[in-house]
Image (tube, rainbow, N blue to C red):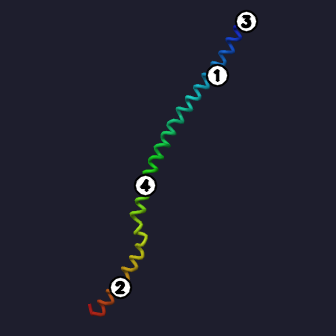
Amino acid sequence: MSMLAASGSNTGWAIGYTIGIVVVLVVVALVVPILLLARSIGTDAAKINDGLVDAVRHTAALNNLSTTNEHAALVVAGLRRGRNRLGG
């Protein structure tokens, strides 16, 4: 009788360990793809950031475009005045 009780208690432990291992495997199976995707996003983000830094560097001169337009308008206005004075 005690041999049967001992066998029954071991079965419970075996079922518990089996369920625990299955749960751990399921969690690992769900987390690994998420971690791989996060790594891929991190790699792409670095490339995107490098591209944006280059874009900022290449377009920095556009910051002064309004000043250039104002100066060009003043030059054109001066040329018109000169043309009008010369009768053209």
* Image quadrant where residue 4 sits: top right
22 and 49: which is toward the camera: 49
- Ranked by sequence position, the earlier of labels 2 and 3 is 3
* Image quadrant where residue 10 sits: top right
* Label of residue 77 in the image: 2
Q: CA distance from mark 2 to mark 3?
A: 113 Å
* Label of residue 50 in the image: 4
Question: Mark 2 packing: few (<14 Cα in 10 Å), some, or many (20+)?
Answer: few
Name the amino acid, label 2.
Ala
Q: Which residue is mark 3?
A: 1
- Ranked by sequence position, the earlier of labels 1 and 4 is 1
**Picture coordinates of residue 87, whole percent (x, y):** 27, 93
Is 15 on the left-hand or right-hand side of 36? Answer: right
54 and 76: which is toward the camera: 54
Residue lying at 38% horizontally and 83% vertically, measured from the top left: 74
Q: Is residue 14 above or below residue 68?
A: above
- Ranked by sequence position, the earlier of labels 2 and 4 is 4
Q: Which residue is mark 1?
A: 16
- Ranked by sequence position, the earlier of labels 1 and 3 is 3
Question: Mark 1 packing: few (<14 Cα in 10 Å), some, or many (20+)?
Answer: few
Q: CA distance from mark 1 to mark 4?
A: 51 Å
